[in-house]
Image (cartoon, coloured by chain):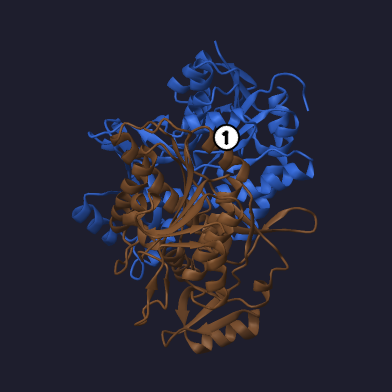
Chain colours: A blue, B brown
Amino acid sequence: MSMSEPRTIVVALGGNAILQPGHKGTFDEQDEAVKLTCEELAELVAHGDRLLVTHGNGPQVGNILIRHEMAAGVVPRMPLDVCGAESQGQIGYMIQRNLRNALRLRHIDAEVVTITSQTLVDQDDPAFRSPTKPIGPFYSRDEARQAMAQKGERWIEDAGRGWRKVVPSPDPVAIVESEVVRQLLAAGMVVIASGGGGIPVRKAPDGRLQGVEAVVDKDLAAQRLAAAAGADILMILTDVHKVSLGFRTPRQRDLDVISSSEARRYIAEGHFSPGSMLPKVLAAVRFVEGGGDFAAICSLEEAIAALAGRAGTRVTRG
Amino acid sequence: MSMSEPRTIVVALGGNAILQPGHKGTFDEQDEAVKLTCEELAELVAHGDRLLVTHGNGPQVGNILIRHEMAAGVVPRMPLDVCGAESQGQIGYMIQRNLRNALRLRHIDAEVVTITSQTLVDQDDPAFRSPTKPIGPFYSRDEARQAMAQKGERWIEDAGRGWRKVVPSPDPVAIVESEVVRQLLAAGMVVIASGGGGIPVRKAPDGRLQGVEAVVDKDLAAQRLAAAAGADILMILTDVHKVSLGFRTPRQRDLDVISSSEARRYIAEGHFSPGSMLPKVLAAVRFVEGGGDFAAICSLEEAIAALAGRAGTRVTRG
């Protein structure tokens, strides 16, 4: 263990840290993937750093929505916010148990805890006027048209695979359980929070929180979480080694270190795809602009190396 | 707010605090029931007491199992421990949001947090040799026989409604996240934990925690939780007003106050039904024998009155 003041590191796990591509998502597959992921995470804790973990939930909440849909004739289907809460329990439990096991094997006694997390969004976010995030199973054109006409929902045709409902993806404003996260980290615990970007809620005129049918980007939520926790480092783990310009073109150029102003310029020039690298780079930029030491975007396997500046793309303030 | 040292009260909510009898369990029904429940819980906090909430998950995990079963041809079904984790997220979110709203309306700023909770059980618990707890949907006799022959499972015929799988209901040994609960309560937060009795886990020979296909009684888990939290009072809320001898017979006698030794004698005499009042009385007895001030078994509506000794059945040490 390092004897210096511990740093607080937020690690945002991508979907493939839990459910690897090409897998159907059986429990054994997911538990094995989570176990491998937790070996890496345990190394971070072994270095003496404080760890706050967040994660995506795309494949898992997709499966939950399919289950709710297929059983809807027998048991009532739950709204998207409740399905998100289910996915937090499911994934949080798998990470929490495996990470605790990995820590104990290293003789580290830190507690590991998952908290059910809500993310506040703004009712006036422009995303509510143009839903873009596909959720749930595929349907026929007729079914989609019926839902659009009868329920006022928005649906899109997805690359020949069928029609899917789309929901808004508003910007996260705040993590409702920020204070809880701060207290647990200060007590030396490893915290798992804001799974799937957090359960989106809005403030009603009377001040009450209400669930919202929306999906918050998990990397943008990770930045809000990191800022709320006063974290030093934000690590966004994904399935590529570095951020690139001209990704998958003959002129692809991988980036080692970029300043936040360079990153903002690349964003404005349209280098990053909206559903994938853009929110990661934006989250990194916001994090360092808000006072974080640095952000790293890298692969899971290279997390330790990226922390030392030997892998991934590092985003710095400037 | 009281100016004296705050007491810590553990409230164990029964199923009807979340899903009322005769309801199918739509989101609106459950959210409304939770909202009413949280009005009562907020009153406890308004009295100046520290609150730790736990809850059953019978109807909700039942619905989750049905969904997993009906969609099993399309998306992999998850084991019972993962389904329990899903139910903790789902129910915890509903309580957490509604309780926070109820507190804010009373100008109480306390944080409310749900933690994903595991309950340690003993591999050698005799319950593993005789599973008794029915779970999941009903099946035909042929399907049940096939599962018994091929998978070595135990199934029972349930009062003419069909066949159901039964799983063990081992005694809870410890709450894995005890230290987390203690820290959060000490920080003045309202904590929701051990939903559905907690996700049952056992310690493998190498020390790792593994999920177990079992169901822990939520009232017995509530007692372990209360003891771990050093709680002063355990309140078990249910759908009857008091504990009775000769329940629903012409000689029914309702109990106002009983000592733990009286309660132990009534248990030994077989006064309480195993699937319902017995674990509640046993949990109350264990709690006061372990040093708790008193336990109360009462209806949700009479919780405040029971706390003042004007309703419900109080169990005291002696």
Q: Nearer the viewer, residue B145 or A283?
A: B145
The reply, left or right, for residue B13 in relation to residue A244 is left
Q: Is residue A89 depicted above or below A216 in this figure?
A: below
Question: Which part of the image, by quadrant, shows the C terminus of chain A?
Answer: top right
Which residue: 61% across, 53% down?
Answer: B290
Tell which residue pokes out farthest to the top in this image: A318
User: Neighbour class for label 1 at 10 Å: few (<14), some, many (≥20)?
Assistant: few
Tell which residue pokes out farthest to the front in this image: B318
The reply, left or right, for residue B70 in relation to residue B167 is left
Question: Which part of the image, by quadrant, shows the N terminus of chain A?
Answer: top right
Where residue A88 appears, as percent x and y from the top left, is: 50, 47
The reply, left or right, for residue B222 in relation to residue B173 is left
Q: Quadrant of residue A55?
A: top right
Q: Nearer the viewer, residue A313 or A108?
A: A108
Which residue: 47% across, 71% down?
Answer: B276
Where residue B13 appears, as percent x and y from the top left, is: 42, 56
Q: Is residue A133 depicted above or below A281 in this figure?
A: below
Where residue B144 appears, as percent x and y from the top left, is: 54, 84
Residue type marked 1: Arg
Which residue: 42% across, 47% down?
Answer: B93
Q: Quadrant of residue A143?
A: bottom left
* Residue B147, visible in the rendered structure: yes
Q: Is residue B216 depicted above or below B209 in this figure?
A: below
Circle 1 — which element?
A: loop
Tell which residue pokes out farthest to the left in this image: A150
Chain label for disc 1: A
Number of numbered discs present?
Answer: 1
Q: Nearer the viewer, residue A192 or A221?
A: A192
* Residue B78, visible in the rendered structure: no
Where residue B218 appears, as percent x and y from the top left, is: 51, 60
Which residue has dot 1 on it? Answer: A248
